[in-house]
Image (spheres, grey):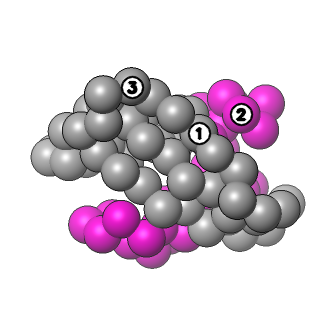
Amino acid sequence: MGYIKVKARAGAKKNLLVQKGPDSYEIHVKAPAERGLANEAVRAMLAAHLGLDPKKPRLIKGASTPAKIFEIL
């Protein structure tokens, strides 16, 4: 499918996904930005929005920053 750009915000009051463009999203998650919890929550929300298996989106850049790039397999 391709690459998806995500701007993630961890520790939000509620989970929220906003599509900014055809391949870019802003995703707010309640999970804290520690031990990869926020990354997993972002990946799960992205997969659910796209109707994919939660393991399909693969984080290829931005594991420790808010700007992330996921590859959709």
Q: Secondary structure at mark 1?
A: strand
Q: What residue sits right under mark 2 in the picture?
A: 49
Q: Quadrant of the N terminus?
A: bottom right
Is 71 included in the stretch rendered in magenta?
yes
From where the camera sits, is residue 37 visible? Answer: no
Q: What residue sits right under mark 1 in the picture?
A: 17
What number is the disc on residue 14? 3
Q: Secondary structure at mark 3?
A: loop
In this picture, which residue range is highlighted in magenta?
46-73
| Classed neighbour count for the residue bearing mark 2: other residues with Cα under 10 Å, few (<14), some (14–19), many (≥20) | few
Q: Quadrant of residue 21?
A: bottom right
| Classed neighbour count for the residue bearing mark 1: other residues with Cα under 10 Å, few (<14), some (14–19), many (≥20) | some
Residue type, mark 2 in image: His
Q: What residue is at 65 percent from the left and 37 percent from the top?
A: 47
| Classed neighbour count for the residue bearing mark 3: other residues with Cα under 10 Å, few (<14), some (14–19), many (≥20) | few
The image shows a total of numbered marks equal to 3
- Residue 54 is situated, as x and y percent measured from the top left of the image, at 59, 33
